[in-house]
Image (tube, helix red, strand yellow):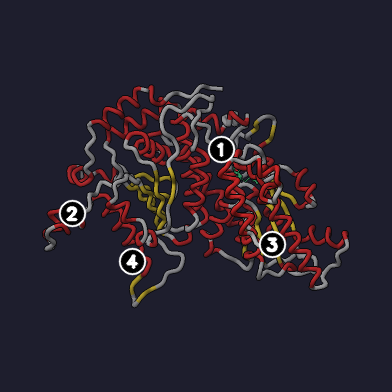
Amino acid sequence: MTTPVDATATAAWAELSALRDSFAPDLRGWFAADPDRAARFTLDAADLHVDLSKNLVTDDILAALVRLAEETGVAERYAAMLAGEHINTTEDRAVLHTALRRPPGATPALVVDGQQVDADVQAVLAAMSAFADRVRSGEWTGVTGKKVTHIVNIGIGGSDLGPVMVSAALEPYATDIEARFVSNIDPFDLANKTKDLDPETTLVIVASKTFTTLETLTNARLARDWLWAGLEASGAISSDEADRTNAVAHHFVAVSTALDKVAAFGIDPVNAFGFWDWVGGRYSVDSAIGLSLAIEFGPEVFRDLLAGFHAIDEHVRTTPLAQNVPVLMGLLNVWYSNFLGAQSHAVLPYAQQLSRFAAYLQQLTMESNGKSVRWDGSPVTTSTGEVFWGEPGTNGQHAFYQLIHQGTRLIPADFIAFANPAYPLEDGGRDVHGLFLSNFLAQTKALAFGKTAEEVEAEGTTGALVAARTFPGNRPTTSIFAPALTPAVLGQLIALYEHITFTQGVVWGVNSFDQWGVELGKQLALQIAPAVEGDAAAIDAQDASTRALLAYYHAHRKA
Ligand code: F6P
């Protein structure tokens, strides 16, 4: 195991600290003095056109950040990841989500720990594609011979958030099969998503890397009961064991790394699609976990998505650090978090289809980098893991932008926009998408340059209102522009954030690929379950607060 470099002990860190101490952000002044700033700070990565110029950095700061990446070994660690080294130290695993999107025939072939990685990836992709085609064509039917019209994907975390987000994002590519997603163990979720479905035309995908997750297995059993009850009520099957098994074989498939557990659940392993322990849950939408997407949109769309991921992987692999877009964006986040005190980061897509993008990024970034120990077990030496959040514009403008514009906190924000709309509409002859984009441009401009008291007064405002109507500016943003939200561009966006996350993780020295922090709550939930069910000894074993909450529950729960 290589020891992480302590970023705070590097020469670049000392340099950045000195730059911070004399730092006086002045985007108005910087732009006025430097006509090339926008051009110099704008870079392309595949189809993503990324304008970094409205960030609170000078050339000196950016150069020092790049040196920080060099001194902490970002490039070396990326190469180690691509080569299949076990950089997930606490689980002793390779980290190879980038292998999931290597094109067929990529050379040299990737062999890791004796596994022919490329061949295995392509075999699963071929099986997924063939299955998706069978479902889409109607060759695969439910137990009564009807074509599938609805998919219910049951999974949680990485086995849900990616497919949910992509399904919404690619809605304009929708076909005659609709996908729904059940994740929460709150029984409302399954009941609500299935209440208007016909079991005869529904295919359930149970998606779980480990196939042990409480929420997913509970929902899978509930879905199986729903299927049997519906088919039996309509007389499609009897309650005989053989009929029920046959129904599951027609209506349930699984995606997992644990195919033995899939079989134990009662799903024929023939109808299971595998992946490998070197794919982290939050990095798995491009694995067989994307099966629902391959069915909903067709395998070609899924392959286009993968090609988008790969384009950014290649950008990262082949571009010097100083022009490397995800690396620079990760370094900017380090600058804001560790030197300017930012605690959160907003992601604001100007595309309604990206309504779940921030939720997806929350798992990607916060489960990856929300750590207090480094990959060798030693404590981190600086703060890690910002809070990622956001909503699509323009909705956010009418909700929380006030705080970004005039609040007391520094909130770096990424704005994402597309030149072309999914649905071009006109309002009285005026292109509505143009109006939408005017908002994207206006917001980044207002945040950067603000409005001075003099400008406010020049409009006739006087007295106390002047201060209230003044905008300080110097609120940092990155603008990410692309021609359109195609499957390939979406893959590029996801990969962009994966590599931003990776860069920050390396600088901080954390293992971005484990998630031990989710374990304690899971264990305690299992321990507390008997207390919730009324077991007196289990209730007594709880702390005073939990006992009181249990008492409230028992007093109010209707029989
Ligand atoms: O609880 C966190 C987590 O382990 C995530 O990392 C993972 O994506 C999710 O649970 C679901 O796990 P699985 O795919 O094994 O059901």
Amino acid under disc 4: Leu
Q: Earlier in the sequence, mark 1 or mark 4?
A: 4
Residue 498 in percent (x, y) is at 50, 42
* Mark nearer the viewer, 3 or 2: 3
Mark linked to residue 467: 2
Q: CA distance from mark 1 to mark 3?
A: 35 Å
Residue at x-position 52% and y-position 35%: 512
Amino acid under disc 2: Ala
Q: CA distance from mark 1 to mark 2?
A: 44 Å
Q: Is residue 275 left or right of residue 161?
A: right
Q: Earlier in the sequence, mark 2 or mark 4?
A: 4
Q: Earlier in the sequence, mark 1 or mark 3?
A: 1
From the viewer's perspective, is residue 479 above or below residue 505? below
Determine contact: label 1, label 4, CB under 8 Å.
no
* Mark nearer the viewer, 4 or 3: 3
Q: CA distance from mark 4 to mark 3?
A: 55 Å
* Residue of label 3: 559
Residue 178 in percent (x, y) is at 62, 65
Residue at x-position 72% and y-position 61%: 134
Figure quarter occupied by ligand 1: top right
* Residue of label 4: 435
Place residue 63 in its image quadrant: top left
Residue 23 in percent (x, y) is at 24, 35
- Tell me the crowding category of disc 2: few under 14, some 14 to 19, or many 20 or more residues within 10 angstroms, Cα based: some
* Residue of label 1: 517
